[in-house]
Image (cartoon, helix red, strand yellow):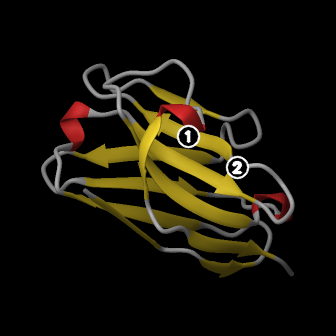
Amino acid sequence: VQLQASGGGMVQPGGSLRLSCAASGFSLDGHAIGWFRQAPGKAREGVSYINTGTGSTYYADSVTGRFSISRDNVENMVYLQMDSLKPEDTGVYYCARSRFRSVVVFAPDLIDYWGQGTQVTVSS
C-alpha cells in the first residue's frame, strides 16, 4: 500500500493549489480517504475526507467553502482543491487512508496508512 501526495507549493494569500494523492496497492472503493495537515508546533488535524459508498464528505470548519475533495476510483486518485488560501493554511498536508469504508470523524487513530506529506506555504 502506498499513498503518494503531490501538488504542494508556495502561493500568495487568495491563491489556489490542487493536491493529488496517488493510491496504489489497494482499491479506493474500500476505504474512507482524505487529508490531514500539520502546521509547525501544532497537532496534526483532519482537513477533509470522503467516504466510500455514499461519497459523503467532511470538511473542517476552517476550510469549509474554500476546499473541495474528490476521488477517482478508476484512476485511484484523491484530490484536494484549495481555493482562497490563507496564511493559516500553511503546513504539511498528508494523504491518509482509514481502515474503514465510512467514518463519521477523521481521526489519526482511524488511519492505517499515511502518505509522505507535501508542503503548502501561503505567504505574501
Question: Cβ–Cβ below 8 Å for labels 1 and 2?
Answer: no
Q: In this view, does 42 lie above or below 18?
A: above
The one of 2 and 88 positioned closer to us in this rendering? 2
Residue 6 position in % (x across, y down): 44, 73
Residue at 73% x, 75% y: name it: 121
Answer with the quarter of the image where residue 88 lies: bottom right
Residue at 46% x, 44% y: name it: 34
The one of 65 and 56 positioned closer to us in this rendering? 56
The N terminus lies in quadrant = bottom left
Q: Is residue 116 above or below residue 65?
A: below
The C terminus lies in quadrant = bottom right
Residue on which disc 1 sits: 48
Disc 1/disc 2 C-alpha distance (Å) = 12 Å
Disc 1 residue type (three-letter): Ser
Q: How crowded is mark 1: few (under 14 residues within 10 Å), some or many (20 or more)?
A: many
Residue on which disc 2 sits: 44
Residue 4 position in % (x across, y down): 36, 68
Residue at 37% x, 33% y: name it: 32
